[in-house]
Image (cartoon, rainbow, N blue to C red):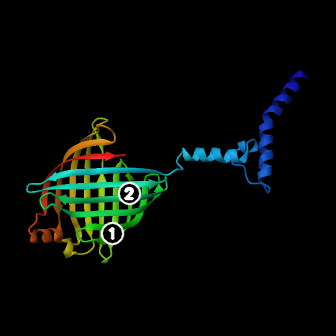
Amino acid sequence: MKKFLTILMAGTVIASPGLAQHSHESEASGDKKPLWSQADEYYDPDEMAEARAAVLHHHGNSPYWFVMADRLETQIHEEEEVLVWDAQGYFGGDINKLFIKTEGEYSFEDDEIEDAEIQALWSRAVSPYWDVQAGVRYDVEPDGLSHAVLGVQGLAPYLFEVDSAAFLSENGDLTARTEVEYELLFTQRLILQPRIEANFSAQDIPEREIGSGLTDLDAGLRLRYEVKREFAPYIGIEWQKSFGDTADFIEASGGESEGTAFVIGVRGWF
């Protein structure tokens, strides 16, 4: 008899949570709103809403911003020096962001900005590592031309950073650009960064000295030392070459279609 009572009490204790849960599920299946958690049964709804907002705020459901100058460098060629910048920043959440990108080139020899562009893009995450981006690009120099932009940005397998976009200008010209970077860590602070940038055009654009097909390719190596994570000076070398009709346009105007530059610059973010 004693053994039977012991088994009966143990069974009652084990079954109690299940019976309670069954009771709540039964209530949820009726007209009442389904429970977000069991705590809703015991705490004030306003307190629960405030607690949920705090949890979501500290676990990704809040906007944040980031700005990075990936390249701010002087490129030293045989006959000229140019200042090159390539920066981007964003504001938003995990899924949707507003991206601002800018890059350009300033000639010390001619004391003028030769190329400068700025992009405003809506960026939406479509997977844990990839964003689809769409927006507008405006070329401040050389000709004040506007473009529609559609592209992707993310992290490919083996940690290759990829930024690729197609541009449709207001004149109807279609071009594209792909940038691929990789970071090879010699130490936690000394990092070698191979980088390739390729540009393409669907048609000849003589007024911009651009031919159809692969127009130009930049391939560089940059060795940086992160004094702080947010600040890293670097040195490097970059090979630059134009192809096809683009090379013909450049050479016809007296320029060089191929060259190598020594680079020195800083990379920073905050």
Q: Residue at left 33%, top 71%?
A: 147
Dots 1, 2 in contact, CB < 8 A: no
Which quadrant of the view contains residue 186? top left
Q: Where's residue 119, x and y in %?
A: 35, 63
Q: Where's residue 176, x and y in %?
A: 30, 66
Q: Amino acid under label 2?
A: Gln
Residue 36, numbered label: none
Residue placed furthest toward the bottom: 171
Relative to residue 211, is residue 79 drawn left or right?
A: left
Classify mark 2: helix, strand or loop: strand
Relative to residue 170, is residue 141 drawn left or right?
A: left
Foreground residue, 2 or 42?
Answer: 42
Residue 153, numbered label: 2
Q: Residue at left 85%, top 29%?
A: 9
Q: Residue at left 73%, top 52%?
A: 34
Is 190 located above or below residue 260 in the figure? above
Q: Amino acid under label 1?
A: Phe
Classify mark 1: helix, strand or loop: strand
Residue receiving disc 1? 167
Q: Where's residue 238, x and y in %?
A: 18, 52
User: Which comes sooner in the sequence, label 1 or label 2?
Assistant: 2
Structural crowding at the residue carrying mark 2, measured as other residues with C-alpha within 10 Å and reported as few (<14), some (14–19) or many (≥20): many
Q: Where's residue 109, x and y in %?
A: 11, 59
> Which quadrant would the N terminus be assigned to in this image?
top right
Structural crowding at the residue carrying mark 1, measured as other residues with C-alpha within 10 Å and reported as few (<14), some (14–19) or many (≥20): many
